[in-house]
C-alpha cells in the first residue's frame, strides 16, 4: 500500500492513549513508506496525526471543504492541501487517493466517513481494506453491534470480512497489507 487514509477525531478525546496511539501510527506510516491522506484539519487527533507524520519526514495530503477552510480549521503546512466544495467530493477524493482506510477513535465525522467508505465497498465501488484501530477498546460497542447485525443477517460475511479490527497499529497494517496484495494478485 502506498497511501492510507486515516479517519479520526477532530477532538483530542478523554484518554492520553488516544493521542499516544495516533502518534504511534503516524510514525509507523512514515517508516513503512506510506503516504497519509486525511481530512486536512489542524484540530484534535487529526492535527496531531499530520504534525507527527510531517515531523518524521512523511508525506501528507489533506482534503478539506471550503467551509472548514474558511472557518480556519485547515492544517496549512501539509505536503498537499486540496480544498473541495462539498463533503461528498471530499470523501470521493479520499477514496480515490488511498489504497486503504483506517478509523481511529473519533466522533460523528469519523463514523460517517467510515460507514460511507464501507458501504462503497459493498456497492463494489472499491475493494480496498478498511481497518478499525480499537485503541483502549474504544470501538468495542460498535464491534458488538457489527456482530449483532451479522447474526441478524443484515450484514453478510463478505461485508464483515473487509473490516480488519485490531488494537495494535502494526498488526492492523500488516493484515491490511495482505488483503491489498491478495487483491492486486486477483486483478493481474
Ligand atoms: P469527528 O470524528 O466528528 O471529530 O470528525 C472527524 C472526521 O470528520 C475527520 O476524519 C474529518 O475528515 C472530518 N472533520 C470533522 N470536523 C473537522 C474539522 N474541524 N476539520 C477537518 N475535518 C473535520
Image (spheres, rainbow, N blue to C red):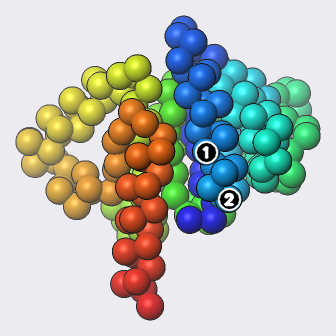
Residue 182: x and y, percent?
37, 74
Query: Which of 104 and 53 lies nearest the eye of the viewer?
Result: 53
Check disc 1: other Cα within 10 Å, few if <14, some if 14-19, many if 20+.
Answer: some
On screen, 81 above or below 16?
below
Check disc 2: other Cα within 10 Å, few if <14, some if 14-19, many if 20+.
Answer: some
Regarding mark 1 in the picture, which secondary structure is present there? helix
User: Among all residues in the image, which is located at the extreme bottom?
Assistant: 188
Q: In the image, what residue occupies the spot 40% across and 20% down?
A: 136
Q: Is mark 2 within 8 Å of ligand 1?
A: no
Regarding mark 2 in the picture, which secondary structure is present there? loop
Q: Is residue 5 left or right of residue 167?
A: right
Using the numbered discs, state the Cα–Cα distance from disc 1 to disc 2 in whole angstroms: 9 Å
In which quadrant of the rendered view does residue 28 lie? Answer: top right
Q: Which residue is mark 2?
A: 33
Residue 180: x and y, percent?
44, 68
Q: How many marks?
A: 2
Q: Which residue is mark 1?
A: 28
Q: Is residue 17 left or right of residue 144?
A: right
Give me the disc on residue 103: none
Q: Is mark 1 within 8 Å of ligand 1?
A: no
Screen quadrant of the C terminus = bottom left
Residue 90: x and y, percent?
68, 51
The image quadrant where one finds ligand 1 is top right
Q: In the image, what residue occupies the spot 43% across and 36% down?
A: 168
Amino acid at each position: 500500500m502506498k497511501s492510507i487514509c486515516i479517519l479520526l477525531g477532530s477532538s483530542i478525546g478523554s484518554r492520553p492513549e488516544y493521542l499516544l496511539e495516533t502518534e504511534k501510527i503516524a510514525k509507523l506510516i512514515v517508516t513503512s513508506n506510506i503516504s497519509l491522506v486525511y481530512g486536512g484539519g489542524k484540530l484534535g487527533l487529526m492535527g496531531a496525526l499530520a504534525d507527527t507524520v510531517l515531523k518524521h519526514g512523511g508525506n501528507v495530503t489533506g482534503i478539506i471543504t471550503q467551509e472548514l477552510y474558511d472557518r480556519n480549521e485547515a492544517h496549512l503546512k501539509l505536503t498537499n492541501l486540496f480544498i473541495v466544495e462539498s463533503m461528498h467530493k471530499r470523501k470521493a477524493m479520499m477514496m480515490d487517493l488511498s489504497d486503504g482506510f483506517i478509523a481511529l477513535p473519533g466522533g460523528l465525522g469519523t463514523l460517517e466517513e467510515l460507514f460511507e467508505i464501507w458501504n462503497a465497498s459493498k456497492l463494489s465501488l472499491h475493494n480496498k481494506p478498511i481497518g478499525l484501530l480499537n485503541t483502549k477498546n474504544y470501538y468495542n460497542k460498535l464491534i458488538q453491534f457489527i456482530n449483532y447485525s451479522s447474526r441478524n443477517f443484515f450484514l453478510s460475511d463478505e461485508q464483515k470480512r473487509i473490516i480488519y479490527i485490531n488494537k495494535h497499529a502494526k498488526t492492523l497494517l500488516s493484515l491490511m497489507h495482505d488483503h491489498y496484495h491478495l487483491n492486486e494478485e486477483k486483478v493481474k
